[in-house]
Image (cartoon, rainbow, N blue to C red):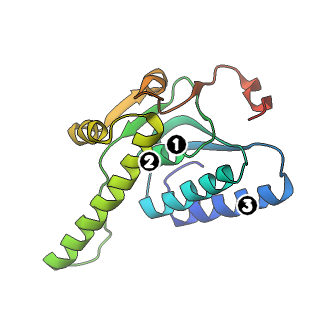
Amino acid sequence: MPGSIEGGTALTFLVDTLTYELNESSAPIWCIIDSPGGIINQGFAIYDAIRMLADSGRVVNTVGFGEVSSMALCILQAGTKRYSFPNTQFMVHQASLFTEEEGAKEVNHLSDEVTELKRLNDIVLKVISDRCGMDMKQLMRLSKKTNLTINAQKAKEFGKNGLIDEIIITLPFLKRDG
């Protein structure tokens, strides 16, 4: 899954993954992620698909390489096992509101958008907090200060359980079961 997470990315991922699931029911699914993040709702479509497959007993491993930021980091957390290449950079930060040329907005509309953005931000941070074993309040404090950027080794040590389970240093990792 390269690039920004948006509607087309989510749809392509879902179609490809479900097609693979129908044709290769015993092999693990590997979700490779190199993304600066993107639209939260489309990211949750991908996250939910991975969790549904994993919850049904399917092994769906996630692998981060290059950049895994924002919503992409949330998606990485959905994996049965979470892997990373050695030089991957991870970033946690507060959700942002991006709008295209939508013209003037009334205060009420902006207030509604901010409320929804806060709600989505809390869900993203809860997913990350639950999986890495860090207190939600601590993660919120860290993400509010700055764009928290860390390398693969620091990601493995993040919280009680890490943002990743293993750093990949050899290519035969794909031949392992699960």
Precedes in sequence: disc 2 or disc 3: 3
- Is 125 rendered above or below residue 84? below
Farthest residue toward the left? 107
Q: Position of residue 73 (x, y in %)?
A: 47, 43
**Tag 1 residue:** 77
- Res. 177 in view: yes
- Give whichever of 12, 77 is nearer the camera: 77
Tell me the residue at 83%/52% (across/down): 25
Q: Which residue is denoted by mark 3 in the rendering?
A: 18
Q: Position of residue 45 (x, y in %)?
A: 54, 62
Disc 2 crowd rating (10 Å Cα; few below 14, some 14-19, many 20+) is some
Q: CA distance from mark 2 to mark 3?
A: 23 Å
Which residue corresponds to the image point at 76% horizontal and 42% vertical from the top-left?
28
Label number found at residue 127: 2
Q: Image quadrant for the C terminus?
A: top right
Residues at discs 1 and 2 in contact (Cβ within 8 Å):
yes
